[in-house]
Image: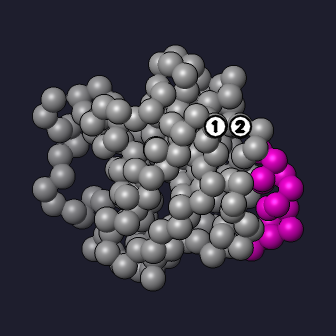
Amino acid sequence: MNKILVLFDSKSGHTARMAALVAEGAGSIAGTEVRLRSVDEATSEDVVWCDGIALGSPTNMGLLSWKMKRFWDDVMMAPWGEIDGKIGCVFSSAGAWGGGSEIACQSLLTLLMNFGFLVFGVTDYVSRDLTLHYGAITAKEPREEDSQAACRKLGRRLAEWTAVYCHGRAEEHPARKMGERMFPEA
């Protein structure tokens, strides 16, 4: 069974909405179990349990939230070596475009790399002007279909990679799937 954890912090509810969409995307891959957890309720056992993690945080001055940083500093130090080699990706919501979401994603990716996660970006475009090189980002709540599609694609790609690399399911490799276009119609 493919096991995905979507772990998020959300103050306004915007990042929580993104997390639900990421979880929906991950769940679209057959044989995938998804746990959706806020940083307030998550435990180290959730992180140890998963094959892959989608980590989400509000953009806080271009960085991850203090609650997310505290979770990794305090809760995750004990099982440090138990999570090495898992697969990870990230997402973030800011108050406005240009609020530092991609930089926040980079801080989340750096955190995961320090714990030994193998991280990735997504080169596929979900619309003519939106891709996920550093992770899924949005200004406020993901209301537009493009932003929602980006979150779903991120979750789906995470589940695809864990299916391939953790469970040997080569048929889930994104490059082998037919019918997906790199640049969808606008």
Question: Helix, strand or loop at disc 1?
Answer: loop
Rendered view: 70 above or below 156: above
The residue that appears at 53% across and 33% down in the rendered structure is 93
Q: Is residue 183 left or right of residue 136?
A: left
Residue 73 seen: yes
**Residue extent of the magenta highlight:** 69-82
> What is the spatial separation of the Cα atoms under label 2 and label 1, in whole angstroms?
9 Å
What secondary structure is found at the residue carrying circle 2? loop
Residue 148 placement: quadrant: top left
Indicate the quadrant where residue 116 lies.
Answer: bottom right
Q: Depth check: 95 or 115 in front?
A: 95
Quadrant into which the C terminus falls: top left
Residue 81 colored magenta? yes
Q: Give whichever of discs 2 and 1 has the lower sequence position.
A: 1
Please say whether residue 109 is visible from this viewpoint. no
The spot of residue 140 in percent (x, y) is: 48, 28
| Residue at 55% from the left image edge and 27% from the top image edge | 94
| Residue drawn at point x = 74 percent, y = 68 percent | 44
Residue assigned mark 1:
11
Residue lying at 58% horizontally and 71% vertically, measured from the top left: 50
Q: Are discs 2 and 1 less than 8 Å apart at CB? A: yes
Give coordinates of residue 49: x percent, y percent.
63, 75
Whether 74 is among the magenta residues is yes
| Amino acid on which the number 1 mark rests in the picture | Lys
Q: Pointer 2: residues within 10 angstroms few (<14), some, or many (20+)?
A: many
Judge whether 76 appears above or below 73 on screen. below
Q: Where is residue 117 drawn, in percent x and y?
A: 64, 59
- Left/right of residue 62 with respect to residue 129 in the rendered view: right
Looking at the image, is 85 positioned above or below residue 135?
below
Image quarter for residue 107? Answer: top right
Q: Which residue is mark 2?
A: 65
Which numbered marker is on residue 67?
none
